[in-house]
């Protein structure tokens, strides 16, 4: 049984939090001031400590510093009714691992514990469906455009917002990228959840502006009840948190990232496979300027691949072969091997959302820009036995009529192959359900 120590001078608050942990089979220790809490901590060495900030005898900052010096493995969550940036920063500098605002819900605590103490067994979550069944994963498209938002009469049907995809699966809400489409998603979530708290995970493919520009306008980040994890790989010149914060600095935006009242946790990914709840996530670096990744989400309803920005190596390596001092045969071998890795990564996906920014004719003029051509994407999806392909990251110069033509061309290529691939162009507001009954491979 895991042990938690609650250091809180308000008896009602302390007992309420203790009840949350007791109901989850934790051993609970309680202290009503900093001195007593420190003594209990050093004597019992609990896995987790919840500490108030303003207490008699020793305040929360002093408790954090002392515990961090003497009990390194112990995780500390500071609970406070004060939402000042300086308090949050000081608590983290003193050794706290997390800073949560009162009143705190078990949902927020549970999510923080999952991150801080992943090795501790958790009580199994209740099933959301009958035995042998699965609740269909739901994918909704909020932004499908690349490079820059293009509202107007020519983009009414497919939409003009930049990349943002919502995935609801296995009890998780996962958001793929924070382009301008995330603003509308935020408004919809506010309407759906009302006064209830939200637990969201935002997966960033890369930090080019069309994929993060909507974050300052994402309304759930302005609600202190909400817990939002932001995951992504390090940017090309600075850390993920610094890049996301920079677009909200004073010259560009009136509210800084650190002033957002939600529980916003930004984490740089190091591994290429990780879990979001019960969903396994696999990632693969894309061929795109800077640090850019694509993701594969393995849900109980099927697999979803998301590669919003990616360029095939075939033409690129041939064009650059002489510059790189390699022969055309060596360039072809390299490109073939890289393509095989991509085929393997998306093999058998129920849904693949792939960068199809250019027609074949346009791509010939944009080799090396980091985006794909229509025929190369269709060929990739066919070879990987993908069930459904969504053409994504529409070029800002492509109006609805042009995208219609690209879909028609893609379907003609599929018909010629004789394979049963479904092709659609990503359309803002569209919703897709995946209803497989067995876990995806």
Image: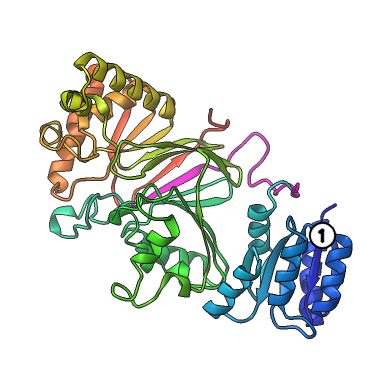
Q: Mostly what secondary structure, the magenta segment?
A: loop
Instruction: State the residue at coordinates (14%, 46%).
Output: 398
Query: Which colour assignment does the render follow?
Result: rainbow
Q: Which residue is mark 1?
A: 46
Extreme residue toward the top, this view:
329
Q: Residue 419: where, in percent of width, then height?
A: 32, 19
Q: Is residue 217 left or right of residue 402?
A: right
Q: Residue at x 53, y 27 (%)?
A: 441
Which x, y percent locates residue 250?
33, 76
Foreground of the two, 41 or 370: 41
Q: For the residue labelled by badge 1, is the local secondary structure a helix, a strand or a loop?
A: loop
Report the front residue among 166 and 83. 83
Is residue 203 inside the magenta stretch?
A: no
Q: Is residue 63 above or below residue 136?
A: below
Q: Can residue 130 be spotted in the picture?
A: yes
The picture places residue 148, in percent across and down from the top left corner, at 22, 56
Q: Is residue 289 left or right of residue 93?
A: left
**Whole-percent x, y for residue 214 in the image:** 34, 62
Q: Which residues are magenta?
A: 120-142
Judge left or right: residue 8 versus residue 141. right
Residue 420 seen anywhere in this rendered image of the structure: no
Taking 257 as reference, is 197 left or right? Answer: right
């Amino acid at each position: 049984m895991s042990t938690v120590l609650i250091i809180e001078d308000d008896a009602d608050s302390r007992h309420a939090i203790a009840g949350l942990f007791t109901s989850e089979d934790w051993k609970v220790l309680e202290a009503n001031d900093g001195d007593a809490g420190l003594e209990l901590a050093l004597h019992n060495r609990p896995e987790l400590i919840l500490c108030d900030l303003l207490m008699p005898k020793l305040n929360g900052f002093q408790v954090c510093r002392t515990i961090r010096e003497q009990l390194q493995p112990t995780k500390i969550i500071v609970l406070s009714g004060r939402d000042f940036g300086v308090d949050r920063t000081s608590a983290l500098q003193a050794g706290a691992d997390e800073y949560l605002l009162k009143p705190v819900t078990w949902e927020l605590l549970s999510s923080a514990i999952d991150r801080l103490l992943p090795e501790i067994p958790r009580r199994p979550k209740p099933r959301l469906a009958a035995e042998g069944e699965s609740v269909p994963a739901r994918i909704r498209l909020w932004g499908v455009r690349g490079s820059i938002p293009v509202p107007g009469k020519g983009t009414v049907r497919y939409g003009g917002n930049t990349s943002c995809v919502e995935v609801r699966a296995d009890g998780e809400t996962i958001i793929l990228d924070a382009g301008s489409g995330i603003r509308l998603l935020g408004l919809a979530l506010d309407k759906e959840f009302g006064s209830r708290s939200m637990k969201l995970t935002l997966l960033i493919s890369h930090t080019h502006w069309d994929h993060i520009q909507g974050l300052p306008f994402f309304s759930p980040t302005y609600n202190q009840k909400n817990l939002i994890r932001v995951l992504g790989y390090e940017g090309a010149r600075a850390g993920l948190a610094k890049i996301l914060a920079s677009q909200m600095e004073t010259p560009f935006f009136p509210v800084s990232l650190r002033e957002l009242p939600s529980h916003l946790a930004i984490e740089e990914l190091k591994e290429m496979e990780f879990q979001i709840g019960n969903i396994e996530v696999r990632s693969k670096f894309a061929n795109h300027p800077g640090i850019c990744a694509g993701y594969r989400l393995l849900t109980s309803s099927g697999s979803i691949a998301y590669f919003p920005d990616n360029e095939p190596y075939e033409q690129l390596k041939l064009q650059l072969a002489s510059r790189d001092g390699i022969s055309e045969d060596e360039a072809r071998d390299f490109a073939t091997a890289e393509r095989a890795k991509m085929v393997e990564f998306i093999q058998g996906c129920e849904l693949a959302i792939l960068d199809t920014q250019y027609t074949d004719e346009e791509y010939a003029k944009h080799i090396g820009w980091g985006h794909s051509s229509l025929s190369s994407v269709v060929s990739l999806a066919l070879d990987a036995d993908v069930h459904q392909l969504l053409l994504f990251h529409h070029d800002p110069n492509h109006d609805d009529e042009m995208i219609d033509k690209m879909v028609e061309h893609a379907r003609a290529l599929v018909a010629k192959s004789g394979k049963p691939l479904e092709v659609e162009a990503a359309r803002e507001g569209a919703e897709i359900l995946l209803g497989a009954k067995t876990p995806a491979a």
